Amino acid sequence: MAEIVIRTGKPESVMPILDSAIRNQLKLLKTSINRTKIRINDFEQKYNMSTEQLMQKISLIINIRQKT
C-alpha cells in the first residue's frame, strides 16, 4: 500500500486542506460512478442487453478465438 508522509510544523493548518482535498476527490469519484451507471443503463436499453449478457457474449467470442 502506498504511504504519504507529510511533515509540518503546523499540523492544524494542514488538516483542513487535506480534508478538503480528500472530500473533493470522493465527490469526483461518486460523480464518475453515477455517470458510468447512467451510461451502462443507456447501453443496456439501446441494445436490449444486460451487462451480464454482453459479458457472456464477449467471453464466448474470446474462447472461440483462442481455439482457432
Image (cartoon, grey):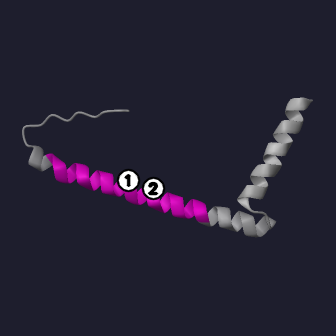
The secondary element bearing badge 2 is classed as helix
Residue placed most toward the observer, 14 or 54: 54
Lateral position of residue 2 relative to residue 19, left or right? right
Task: Kindly report the secondary structure that dominates the magenta region of the rendered protein.
Answer: helix
**Identity of the residue drawn at 38% across and 33% down:** 1
Residue 16 among those drawn in magenta? yes
Lateral position of residue 37 relative to residue 16, left or right? right
- Spatial CA distance of label 1 from label 2 is 6 Å
Q: Circle 1 sits on which residue? A: 25
Residue 15 among those drawn in magenta? yes
Q: Looking at this view, name the residue that lies furthest to the bottom.
A: 45
Say which amino acid is labelled 2.
Leu
Range of the magenta residues? 14-37
Q: Percent x, y for residue 12?
A: 10, 49
Check disc 1: other Cα within 10 Å, few if <14, some if 14-19, many if 20+.
few
Q: Percent x, y for residue 27?
A: 39, 60
Q: Looking at this view, name the residue that lies furthest to the right.
A: 68
Q: Percent x, y for residue 10?
A: 7, 43
User: Residue 65 occupies which quadrant of the picture?
Assistant: top right
